[in-house]
Image (cartoon, helix red, strand yellow):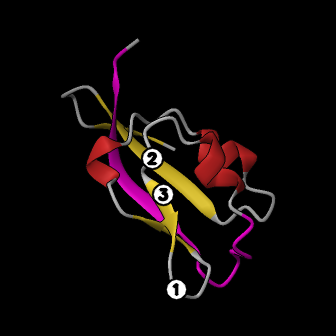
Amino acid sequence: MAKQKLKELVINGDWCKGCGICIKFCPTQVLELDRQDRCIAVRPEDCICCKMCELRCPDLAIEVITEKGEGGDHEK
C-alpha cells in the first residue's frame, strides 16, 4: 500500500461547533481552534493522513483528501 500524501484538508466552518474532539485526536497537532472557536488547520504540512480527525468529528465537518503514490490516483 502506497503511503498517503495530503492533497487537501477541508474543514466546513459552518458545520464545526468547536468541540475540539478533532484537535485531541490529531497525533501531530495539525489542528487548532480559531478566535470563533472553529477548527482550522494551522500546520497542514505535518498531517500524516491518519484521518482520525475526520473519523472522530461528530459534525462531519472535516474531510481529509489524499493522493496515492506518484501515479496520480486519488482517494477520498
- Residue 26 in the image: above or below residue 68: below
- The image shows residue 37 at horizontal and vertical percentages of 62, 80
Q: Are marks 2 and 1 in contact (CB under 8 Å)?
A: no
Q: Secondary structure at mark 2?
A: loop
- Residue 36 in the image: above or below residue 8: below
Mark 3 vs mark 1, CA separation in Å: 13 Å
Q: Residue at x 63, y 41 (%)?
A: 25
Residue 18 among those drawn in magenta: yes
* Label total for image: 3
Residue that label 2 marks? 29
Q: Which mark is residue 31?
A: 3
Q: Residue at x 56, y 39 (%)?
A: 51
Q: Amino acid at mark 1?
A: Arg
Residue that label 1 marks? 35
Q: Are marks 3 and 2 in contact (CB under 8 Å)?
A: yes
| Quarter occupied by the N terminus | top left
Mark 3 vs mark 2, CA separation in Å: 6 Å
User: In the image, which residues are magenta?
Assistant: 2-19
